[in-house]
Amino acid sequence: MVDKSGSNHRVRYNFSITKLLFWSLIFLGLIVFFFFRSPPSPSPSRRVLRGGVDWENSVRQSGLSRSKGKRVLVTGAAGFVGTHVSIALKRRGDGVVGIDNFNSYYDPSLKRARNDLLRREGIFVVEGDINNAPLLRKLFELVKFTHVMHLAAQAGVRYAMKNPASYVHSNIAGLVNVLEVCKSANPQPSIVWASSSSVYGLNSKVPFSEKDRTDQPASLYAATKKAGEEIAHTYNHIYGLSITGLRFFTVYGPWGRPDMAYFFFTKDILKGKKITIFEGPNHKSVARDFTYIDDIVKGCLGALDTAGKSTGSGGKKKGAAQLRVFNLGNTSPVQVSKLVSILEKLLKVKAKKQVLAMPRNGDVLFTHANISYAQSEFGYKPTTDLQTGLKKFVKWYMEYYSSSKGKKSAW
Ligand SMILES: NC(=O)c1ccc[n+]([C@@H]2O[C@H](COP(=O)([O-])OP(=O)(O)OC[C@H]3O[C@@H](n4cnc5c(N)ncnc54)[C@H](O)[C@@H]3O)[C@@H](O)[C@H]2O)c1
């Protein structure tokens, strides 16, 4: 009996050792597998971009302003609006440091090409995420920013049905992170950031005024921008941050976004591909208050130049600070069918059109801005009509996509 149970124990003991050895080997195998699969260590040039003396010098240099100029951190600097705003600021003598994560929501090679343009203007764009608090704090350590132009966001209305988390990541968590770092900075910067006309959602009263309700968003994108406006209120109220929100209305122009209708219509018309024009119930046309990029840039600079100082320091509020929201639109909505006919004339190609009922995926039927508030506060006055603006866009498009850089990504 004793012997039998002893041999039983031995068998069990041997079995446990075999099992242990087996699992150790599996474990070791996994370690070796993941070690060799991990991405290679960054090349020296990449390492310089992420830190080190050269990197710090590039940030400092880029942030230098001419006398009395502002020092501006531009988030989303490699984006469409970010590129144009950064260049305008730099050219008038402000110090500009950009940050962008170069994500692949749309062709990142276009963002890289915009970055080349920025580099030629003396603007350094840090490759990083606005959710990276230590990185943002480091930038504030290197440059005493007077202003933050916060343009980084997950844009696009329909993509929210595919990747809702990206909207929460950039438009909510990212915004909070930017405001957290700004509130603790000493001195606190003044903040101007991009909200959107989409906050007007299902409103039917036109033109849209800043005083109108904004509690019926039609997309998650719109809901995150509306949430951003409420978050801005909180940081203004608790920490004395000066914050200005800008509700952009369908911005278009050279270096624009490939996910927007004017851009992919151009591409598809040239390729002879069918384009889809949506219409509302009872064949109602869809219309947008298309706003040319140069007008938007003027609005951004106007908002920046009239922004009051933040009042807090060391994370504590010292007094009431400015909180504003402005519409930046063109005040003359144009039907999408008209946009197509302008493009047909400019491209000298007839579009193959199909008209479909607008799906309920976040788009609204029309947008129309009342801009009197921005006009009275900083003289905002758009001057480019759709025909003129599209002509400039088409010129850029043809040049860009016939160059070697553009050819690789578009065709
Ligand atoms: N273009 C328009 O018609 C329009 C209309 C209304 C509002 N807006 C708003 O204006 C701003 C600029 O828009 P745009 O048209 O230039 O868009 P864009 O996509 O070209 O630019 C946004 C940039 O932000 C970057 N980015 C996104 N998430 C980031 C993150 N977590 N960290 C770092 N960088 C990040 C992207 O890589 C991109 O380069 C956005 O806030 C957008 O929501 C634009």
Image (tube, helix red, strand yellow):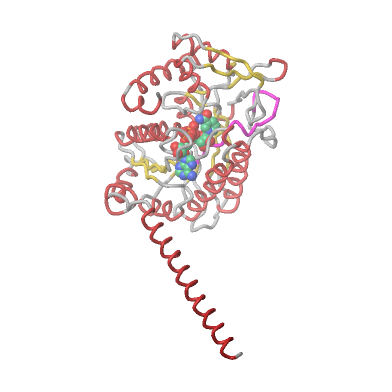
Nearer the observer, 398 or 305: 398
Q: Is any part of residue 206 visible from this angle?
A: yes
Q: How many marks?
A: 0
Q: Which range of residues does the magenta coloring cover?
A: 192-208
Q: Position of residue 222 (x, y in %)?
A: 61, 36
Is 213 displayed left or right of 236 in the figure? right
Answer above or below: position of 266 versus 144: above
The C terminus - image quarter:
top left
- Residue at 36 percent across and 23 percent down: it is 400
Q: Position of residue 383 (x, y in %)?
A: 48, 19
Q: Is residue 124 magenta?
A: no
User: In the depicted view, which residue is nearer to us: 306 or 334?
Assistant: 334
Q: Residue at x 56, y 52 (%)?
A: 319
In the rendered image of this protein, does residue 122 appear above or below residue 144? above
Q: Quarter holding the N terminus?
A: bottom right
Residue at position x 37%, y 45% in the image? 126
Q: Nearer the viewer, residue 409 or 386?
A: 409
Say which quarter of the image contains residue 204: top right
**Residue 111, position as x, y percentages in the image:** 40, 34
66, 265: nearer the viewer = 265
Can residue 193 be found in the magenta stretch?
Answer: yes
Farthest-out residue, right: 282
Residue ID at (42%, 46%): 146
| Residue 305 appears anywhere in the view | no
Q: Is residue 148 above or below residue 350?
A: below
Residue 391 at what x, y percent from top left? 43, 15
